[in-house]
Image: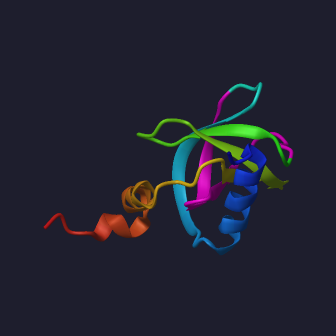
Amino acid sequence: MVDTHESYDVAAQEDRCSPRTKITIPAQLRASGGRAFQTVVHDLSISGFSASAISRMHPGQICWISLPGLESLQAEVVWWENSIVGCAFMELLSPIVHDNILQNYSPSSVYRSAL
């Protein structure tokens, strides 16, 4: 059986080489033991994200991100700097789900034809 911390290490290492897409997605973020707050996701990859965080979050802290139309996704804080938090998903995001999110929130999606 794979240790949860080991899984995190894999996701964190994956995040270093996963393509990250700059994006603006309204979401809710909740730190373990805290209340959910409104945030904006600034970049997203299959292994993690960065988002605005109104108060300091600490590396190793568990949190949940709620993106529109998806169940809450568990993540672990990797870094926090100047009110931006970087997190690694506990389980990699499905590439299909990732692509659907990008399609819905990418600035270029405004120009895509429905045909």
Task: Reply yes or no: does residue 42 show up in magenta.
Answer: yes
Residue at 37% in and 62% down: 103
Q: Residue furthest left?
A: 115
Q: In the figure, residue 86 lies in which quadrant?
A: bottom right
Image quarter of the C terminus: bottom left
Residue 33: x and y in percent read: 77, 25
Q: Residue furthest front?
A: 1
In the displayed structure image, the side of residue 114 where residue 16 appears, left or right: right
Residue 51: x and y in percent read: 67, 51
Residue at 76% in and 53% down: 6
Residue 41: x and y in percent read: 60, 52
Front residue of 72/10: it is 10
In the rendered image of this protein, does residue 54 appear above or below residue 50?
Answer: above
Magenta range: 36-58
In the displayed structure image, the side of residue 76 where residue 39 appears, left or right: left
Residue at 64% in and 37% down: 64
